[in-house]
C-alpha cells in the first residue's frame, strides 16, 4: 500500500502535492488552495487549513503571525437546497436592492 | 468486509466513567440488520458492529472511516435515508434507518478503483497529466468524469419544503460547550430579562466536555449535565442539532443563519457570542488517513458518551492534559496503552490495509514499530474561527493554541463591535479555562446590554 | 504523474524598468493576450496582477462556454473560441477539463419562445446546430427536469463547460516561458502619458510577509493595455478616461460532489438561473439577484442569493431539494451598457488599449479575443471587433445589444 501523507482528506491532497505547488511559486494560501484543491471538499478546510498554513510559513520563511487563513466561505456546514428554498416564512420576504443597471437580465 | 482485527467491545460498566451500551433497535446497513441504540450516531452503531470501512476517498479510493466523530472532517459520508453524503457521525439511529456506503466499485469492502492509489504513489498534478495527444486527453477526461463525485443524486423529492423562522433576541451564542453554556448562564443571571438563545450543532450540549473521560472532578459528562441544567434553570433557550451556517452582513441589516433540524432560522441579536471551540486536527505522517487513526476526542467520546471501547491496544500520540486523561481512562477500561508525545517520539507511518495494525515511530533517529489496533491523535484542536472571521473578528496563527486564534479584548469583544468570542476559539486551553472564560465574557456582555 | 521541483510562471524579482507592452490585469484576458503577443515575437511584455492569479472574475466564474448568442459576431467568435479550447491542453500543456455536454435553455413564456426561435434561426444560419425542443424533448436531455413551467427549449449539444483556473496557469506558464514577466500582488498607482508612451507607477508587495513590504517603482511602457475587468474603469481613470462599463456582483455556489448524471448546462431564461455539473461532480449554479449599485467591486455573499436560487432550482429539479450547498462566493461582472465588450484605442490616447466590458462572458471569449488582439498589435489584420466594439459607439448611440446574457 503506497504511503501517502494526506493533508486534505476530503480531496485526497497529499503533502507532496502542496510541496509541488510551492515549488511552482504558488506560496500564497489562496494559490495553494486553488492549485491543489485542498480545502474545497465537504469539510471546506476545517481539517487542512492549519497544517497547510504552518507548512507555508516554514516554506516561505514568513512568520506565522503574518499568515492569514483562506476566506471562510459561507455556509460553514453543508445545507440542503430544500432548507434554503422553503425558508421565507416567519415574517417578511427576503429583501433585495434594485435591479442591475445597464444590462438586461436574461428574462 | 471486515478484517479480523480486534473487535470493538463494550466498555466495562464503571458508572463513574462510562455508560453501558445496550442496543435497542436495528438499522438497515446494505441489507444487513445492525443493532443500534436509538439516538446514537450511525457511525457509532456501525463501528460497534465492526464495520470498519464507511467510505472510499474521492480520488484514490482509499478506505476511510470517521476521524473526528463530531461532524467536521467529512471522512464518514454515507447514503442515509436516500440522501447522499450524509455525515454518519451526525445522523442518529432509529429503527430500520437505511444506510449505504458510496463511491466504490464493486463494493466499499473491495474497491478495484483503489488502483488509483497505487498509480499515483505520492500524489498527482491533475493539471498537467495526459494533456496530449488529444485522443488520450479526451479519454482521460471521460474516465475522470465517470469517476468523479461521491454520492448519487437523492432518489426522490421531499413532499414539502420546511418553513423558515425569524428570531430577534438580545444575545445569541453559537456553541454549547463549557464556554458557551457558562456565558449563557452568566448573562441570564445578571440580566434575567434578556433573551438568550444558545445553538449547538450536536444533538446535545456539552461540547468538548462530552469527550472528556475519567472519574471524579474530571468527569466531562457530569460537568456537561451540570452546566446544561444551570443554563436551563437560568432561562437560556437551548437549541441542539442547530448548526450556525454563516454570518450574512448584507441581508436584512446583518443576520446569523442557522440550520435547525433542516429549518432555516434567521437570527438577529444585539450581541453575538462565538463559543465555537476547536476542530479535531490530524498530524502529518504516512497513511495518517488509515481507518483506525482517530482523533483522540473521538476515542474519548466513544468511551465516555457511547460506551464503546475503540481499541484494545491503542497508541496515543500527543501531549497535554487530554492525552493523559484518555490514556488513563483507556487503561482503566483494560486497554494496553502506549502513549508517545508526538514530538520527541514522532509518528512516521501507519500500516494496515483497512484498519491500522502498526504505527512506526521515530525517536532519536531510531525507528520503532508499535503493534496496535487504534491510533488516537491528540493534536491540539484548531480554533473554529470560520464564523467569527465572517463576522469581522481578527485571528492570529498561534501554533501553541492549535491554529488561528480569535483576537479579543479583555471583555471578550472582537474587532467587530457587539461581537464576542470565548473559550477554545480564542486558542485552545481546555474545558476548565473555557468555562472560566465563558463566565467572564458572559458577565461583560450582560453589563454591556 | 511525477511531482518534482519546477519553476513556476510568477516573477520573483522587481518589475523591470522599461517594457514595450504593459498589461494591467492578470486575469485570463491579460494572460492570454500576453501569451499571444509573446507567441508572435513581442519581446518585452509585463503583466501586473494586483492580487493572486484567479483572484478576480477569471477565478470565480461558472466555466460555461457556448455558441448560442443573439448576434452573428458573438456566434462566430464563440465557434472559434470553442475550437481553441479543444486544443488548449495539447498546446499549452494544462488540462482545462472541457466537456461538451451542451447548453439547454428553457423558455417559460411566449415572448421568450419567440426570442428563442429568432436566435436559433440566426445560430443555424451561422453554422451552429441549435435545435428547438418541446418540453418533453427537454426532459429527454435532462430526465430529472420538471417541465411544468416550460413552454419551449433550445439545445446545442456542442456547447459545454470547462474548469476556469487552469487556463490562467496554462497561459501564464507559456507566456513566462517566452519571456513575459508576470507579477502578482502588484498594483498600478498612476499612469502618465509621455507622448511616446507611458510612465507607470507600480507597487509590488513582495518578500517575506506579503502585503508587508511594498516596493514602489516606475515602469516606462510604450503601450499599456487595460485588461483589468471589473476594475478597468478605475484603471482608465488614471489616464482621465471615464468608461461606461461598471462592476456588478454575480453570486454563485457549488454543491457537494455527486456522481455524474447531468449532461448539459441548463439555463432558465426567466430568472437567469443556470446549473451544470463539474468534473468533480459538484453542481455549480448561479442566478440573477437584484443588487444595489455601489460603483465598486463587491464580492460579499448573501443569503438572499441562496434562497432565491434554491427556490428556482428546486422548482425545475425537485430532487435537488436534498442536495447540499458546500460553499458560495461572488465575482464581478464587468457590465457594459449594450452587453458587448470595449476594445481598441480610445480617441486621443494612442498606445493605450482597452480590453474590457466583457460582462459575464469574458472568460469563454478570451481565447479568441486575445488571439485576434495579439495579431492586431503585432501588425496583423484589424478584425471587425475593433470597429464594432469601439468605445465611441456609446457616444454615437450606435448600439447592437447582445440579449443572451445570463446571470
Image: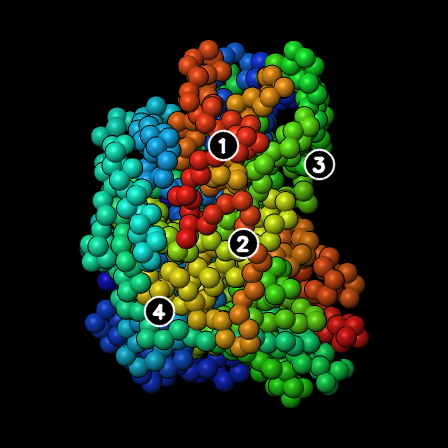
In-front residue for pair A23/C279: C279
Judging by the rendered image, the residue that carries numbered circle 1 is: C398
Residues behind callouts 4 and 2 on a single chain: no
Q: Which residue in the structure is indicated by mark 2?
A: A99
Say which residue appears at 37% left-offset and 60% top-offset: C313
Q: Residue at x 67, y 86 (%)?
A: B234
Q: Name the residue under label 4.
A: B47
- x%, y% of residue A59? 57, 35
Of B345 and A59, which appears nearest the observer?
A59
Check the image and name the residue furthest to the bottom.
B233
Labels 1 and 4 within one chain: no
Q: Nearer the viewer, mark 3 or mark 4?
A: 3
Q: Mark 2 lies on which chain?
A: A
Q: What element carries label 4?
A: helix
Q: Do labels 3 and 2 share a chain?
A: no
SS at circle 2: loop
- Left-right relation of B12 to C234: left
Residue B59's place in the image compared with B31, above or below, is above
Task: Give the mark, 3 or 1, whose residue is nearer the N terminus.
Answer: 3
Q: Which residue is drawn at 33% across and 85% down?
A: B24
Residue B53: numbered disc: none
**Mark in front: 1 vs 2:** 1
Residue B171 pos. (x, y %): 67, 74
Dot 1: what SS?
A: loop
Instruction: Point out the frontmost of discs 1 and 4.
Output: 1
The answer to whether one can see residue C137 in this image is yes
Please identify the quadrant where the N terminus of chain B is shown.
bottom left
Amino acid at each position: 500500500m503506497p504511503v501517502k501523507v494526506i493533508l486534505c482528506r476530503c480531496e485526497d491532497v497529499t503533502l507532496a502535492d502542496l510541496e509541488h505547488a510551492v515549488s511552482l511559486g504558488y506560496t500564497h494560501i489562496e494559490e495553494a488552495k486553488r492549485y491543489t484543491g485542498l480545502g474545497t471538499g465537504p469539510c471546506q478546510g476545517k481539517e487542512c487549513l492549519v497544517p497547510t498554513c504552518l507548512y507555508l510559513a516554514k516554506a516561505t520563511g514568513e512568520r506565522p503571525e503574518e499568515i492569514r487563513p483562506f476566506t471562510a466561505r459561507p455556509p460553514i456546514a453543508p445545507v440542503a437546497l430544500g432548507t434554503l428554498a422553503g425558508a421565507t416564512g416567519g415574517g417578511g420576504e427576503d429583501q433585495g436592492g434594485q435591479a442591475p443597471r445597464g444590462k438586461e437580465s436574461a428574462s | 468486509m471486515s478484517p479480523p482485527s480486534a473487535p470493538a467491545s463494550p466498555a466495562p460498566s464503571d458508572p463513574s466513567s462510562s455508560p453501558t451500551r445496550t442496543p435497542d433497535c436495528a438499522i438497515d446497513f446494505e441489507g444487513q440488520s445492525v443493532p443500534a441504540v436509538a439516538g446514537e450516531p450511525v457511525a457509532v452503531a456501525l463501528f460497534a458492529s465492526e464495520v470498519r470501512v464507511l467510505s472510499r476517498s474521492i480520488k484514490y479510493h482509499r478506505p476511510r472511516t470517521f476521524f473526528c466523530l463530531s461532524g467536521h472532517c467529512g471522512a464518514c459520508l454515507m447514503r442515509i435515508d436516500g440522501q447522499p453524503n450524509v455525515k454518519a457521525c451526525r445522523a442518529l439511529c432509529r429503527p430500520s434507518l437505511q444506510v449505504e456506503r458510496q463511491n466504490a466499485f464493486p463494493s466499499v469492502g473491495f474497491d478495484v478503483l483503489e488502483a488509483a492509489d497505487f498509480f499515483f504513489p505520492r500524489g498527482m498534478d491533475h493539471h498537467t497529466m495526459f494533456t496530449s495527444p488529444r485522443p488520450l486527453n479526451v479519454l482521460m477526461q471521460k474516465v475522470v468524469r465517470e469517476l468523479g463525485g461521491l454520492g448519487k443524486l437523492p432518489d426522490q423529492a421531499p413532499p414539502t419544503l420546511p418553513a423558515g423562522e425569524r428570531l430577534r433576541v438580545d444575545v445569541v451564542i453559537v456553541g454549547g460547550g463549557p464556554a458557551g453554556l457558562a456565558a449563557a448562564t452568566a448573562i441570564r443571571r445578571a440580566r434575567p430579562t434578556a433573551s438568550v438563545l444558545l445553538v449547538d450543532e450536536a444533538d446535545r450540549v456539552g461540547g468538548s466536555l462530552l469527550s472528556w473521560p475519567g472519574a471524579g472532578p474530571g468527569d466531562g459528562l457530569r460537568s456537561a449535565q451540570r452546566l446544561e441544567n444551570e443554563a436551563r434553570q437560568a432561562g437560556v433557550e437551548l437549541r441542539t442539532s442547530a448548526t450556525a451556517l454563516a454570518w450574512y452582513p448584507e441581508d436584512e441589516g446583518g443576520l446569523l443563519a442557522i440550520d435547525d433540524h433542516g429549518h432555516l432560522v434567521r437570527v438577529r441579536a444585539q450581541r453575538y457570542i462565538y463559543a465555537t471551540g476547536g476542530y479535531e486536527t490530524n498530524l502529518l505522517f504516512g497513511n495518517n488517513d488509515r481507518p483506525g487513526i482517530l482523533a483522540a476526542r473521538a476515542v474519548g467520546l466513544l468511551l465516555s458518551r457511547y460506551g464503546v471501547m475503540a481499541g484494545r491496544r491503542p497508541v496515543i500520540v500527543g501531549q497535554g492534559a487530554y492525552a493523559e486523561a484518555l490514556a488513563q481512562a483507556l487503561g482503566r477500561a483494560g486497554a494496553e496503552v502506549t502513549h508517545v508525545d508526538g514530538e520527541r517520539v514522532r509518528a512516521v507511518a501507519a500500516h494496515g490495509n483497512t484498519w491500522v495494525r502498526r504505527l512506526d515511530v521515530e525517536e532519536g533517529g531510531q525507528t520503532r514499530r508499535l503493534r496496535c489496533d487504534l491510533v488516537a491523535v491528540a493534536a491540539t484542536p484548531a480554533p473554529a474561527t470560520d464564523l467569527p472571521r465572517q463576522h469581522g473578528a481578527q485571528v492570529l496563527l498561534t501554533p501553541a493554541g492549535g491554529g488561528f486564534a480569535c483576537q479579543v479584548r479583555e471583555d471578550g469583544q472582537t474587532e467587530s463591535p457587539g461581537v464576542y468570542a470565548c473559550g477554545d476559539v480564542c486558542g485552545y486551553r481546555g474545558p476548565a479555562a473555557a468555562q472560566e472564560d465563558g463566565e467572564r465574557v458572559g458577565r461583560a456582555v450582560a453589563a454591556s446590554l | 504523474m511525477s511531482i518534482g521541483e519546477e519553476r513556476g510562471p510568477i516573477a520573483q524579482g522587481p518589475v523591470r524598468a522599461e517594457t514595450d507592452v504593459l498589461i494591467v490585469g492578470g486575469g485570463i484576458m491579460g494572460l492570454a493576450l500576453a501569451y499571444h503577443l509573446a507567441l508572435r515575437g513581442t519581446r518585452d511584455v509585463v503583466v501586473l496582477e494586483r492580487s493572486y492569479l484567479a483572484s478576480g472574475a477569471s477565478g470565480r466564474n461558472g466555466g460555461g462556454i457556448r455558441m448560442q448568442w443573439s448576434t452573428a459576431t458573438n456566434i462566430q467568435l464563440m465557434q472559434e473560441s470553442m475550437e481553441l479550447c479543444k486544443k488548449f491542453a495539447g498546446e499549452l500543456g494544462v488540462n482545462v477539463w472541457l466537456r461538451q455536454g451542451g447548453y439547454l435553455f428553457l423558455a417559460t413564456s411566449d415572448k421568450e419562445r419567440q426570442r428563442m426561435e429568432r436566435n436559433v434561426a440566426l445560430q443555424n444560419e451561422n453554422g451552429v446546430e441549435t435545435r428547438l425542443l418541446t418540453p418533453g424533448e427537454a426532459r429527454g436531455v435532462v430526465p430529472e427536469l420538471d417541465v411544468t413551467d416550460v413552454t419551449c427549449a433550445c439545445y446545442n449539444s456542442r456547447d459545454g463547460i470547462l474548469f476556469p483556473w487552469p487556463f490562467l496557469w496554462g497561459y501564464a506558464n507559456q507566456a513566462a516561458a517566452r519571456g513575459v514577466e508576470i507579477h502578482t500582488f502588484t498594483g498600478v498607482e498612476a499612469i502618465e502619458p509621455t507622448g511616446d508612451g507611458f510612465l507607470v507607477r507600480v507597487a509590488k508587495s513582495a518578500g517575506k510577509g506579503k502585503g508587508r513590504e511594498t516596493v514602489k517603482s516606475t515602469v516606462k511602457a510604450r503601450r499599456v493595455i487595460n485588461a483589468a475587468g471589473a476594475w478597468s474603469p478605475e484603471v482608465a481613470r488614471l489616464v482621465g478616461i471615464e468608461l461606461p462599463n461598471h462592476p456588478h456582483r454575480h453570486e454563485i455556489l457549488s454543491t457537494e460532489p455527486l456522481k455524474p448524471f447531468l449532461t448539459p448546462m441548463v439555463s432558465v431564461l426567466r430568472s437567469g438561473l443556470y446549473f451544470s455539473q463539474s468534473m468533480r461532480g459538484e453542481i455549480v449554479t448561479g442566478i440573477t439577484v437584484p443588487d444595489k449599485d455601489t460603483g465598486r467591486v463587491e464580492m460579499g455573499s448573501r443569503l438572499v442569493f441562496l434562497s432565491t436560487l434554491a427556490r428556482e432550482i428546486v422548482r425545475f429539479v425537485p430532487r435537488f431539494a436534498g442536495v447540499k450547498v458546500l460553499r458560495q462566493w461572488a465575482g464581478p461582472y464587468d457590465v457594459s451598457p449594450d452587453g458587448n465588450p470595449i476594445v481598441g484605442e480610445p480617441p486621443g490616447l494612442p498606445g493605450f488599449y482597452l480590453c474590457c466590458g466583457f460582462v459575464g462572458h469574458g472568460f469563454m471569449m478570451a481565447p479568441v479575443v486575445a488571439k485576434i488582439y495579439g495579431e492586431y498589435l503585432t501588425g496583423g489584420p484589424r478584425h471587425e471587433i475593433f470597429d464594432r466594439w469601439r468605445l465611441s459607439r456609446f457616444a454615437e448611440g450606435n448600439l447592437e445589444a447582445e440579449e443572451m446574457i445570463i446571470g
